[in-house]
Amino acid sequence: MSVAAGLAEVMQRLEAAAGRAGRRPEEIRTVAVSKGHSQASILQAYATGQRAFGESRGQALAAKAHDLPDDIDWHFVGPLQRNKVRIVRPYVGLLQSFDRDSLVDPWLKGLGAPPPALLQVNVGNEPQKAGVEPHEVVSTFDQWEGAGIRPEGIMAIPPIGDAAEDSRPYLARTVPQNERQFPPARPEPVEGPASAINDLF
């Protein structure tokens, strides 16, 4: 299957999932995870109109960002080591895996305001996964905002199951729980992607 055909299939599934959820497809930002793929493949996706791409290795992201069109919106989607922050920070429009306090200081260093980030939440409380626990979301938002980080939402990682329905209860518990905790005068997180094998419900 070609890159264009694969993207078209994903968009059809997304539109169907959005319809079931009562949402408009244009409200959903689709990030093509391009880690491990060639620049030629990324350009094929780019030619279809795809603009947001995700990488999980600092050097690979920097090289691709240097060589590919300037209007690509790069996301970092994997665990980020402190010593790789200086490589990633200049290029990304969003860090999807802000998962621990030790990233705060290095993410603040550098020219200009730090790029926005998503707070990674370990919704299944799995010891092998990073991220804050669901009940820590609001307090962590407060702490990081006070330090100068701009969290734009949460990135939830449910346990991997055999079907999409296996992930739904974890996400259903996490988002409403934290929406109720935000004061009315405070904006709620604007994004909340679900990162798992069964991304499309």
Image (spheres, rainbow, N blue to C red):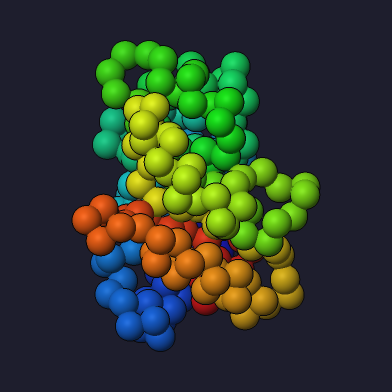
Q: Which residue is drawn at the image coordinates 50% and 51% (left, top)?
A: 137
Question: Is residue 124 something one can see in this rendering?
Answer: yes
> Compared with residue 30, is residue 80 higher up or lower down, i.e. above or below?
above
Q: Is residue 166 left or right of residue 47?
A: right
Q: Residue furthest left?
A: 185
Q: Is residue 143 above or below residue 139?
A: above
Kindly identify the residue that appears in the image at 39 percent across and 67 percent down: 180
Foreground residue, 99 or 34?
99
What percent of the width, then of the height, locates residue 25? 31, 71
Whether 84 is drawn above or below 14: the answer is: above
Compared across the picture, whether 77 is left or right of 21 comes to: right
Q: Name the residue furthest top.
A: 110
Residue 88 x %, y %: 48, 25
The picture quadrant where one finds residue 14 is bottom left
Residue 89 screen position, x and y as percent: 43, 24
Hey, which quadrant is residue 159 in on the image?
bottom right
Residue 84 spot, x, y in % from top left: 57, 20
Quarter of the picture containing the N terminus is bottom right
- Residue at 77%, 49% (x, y): give it: 127
Work out whether residue 32 can be spotted: no
- Horizontally, residue 164 falls left or right of residue 106, namely right
The furthest residue to the right: 128
Seen from the viewer's position, the closer of residues 164 and 169 is 169
Give the mark count: 0
Q: Residue at x 56, y 31 (%)?
A: 101
**20 lies above or below 59:** below
Report the front residue among 103 and 50.
Answer: 103
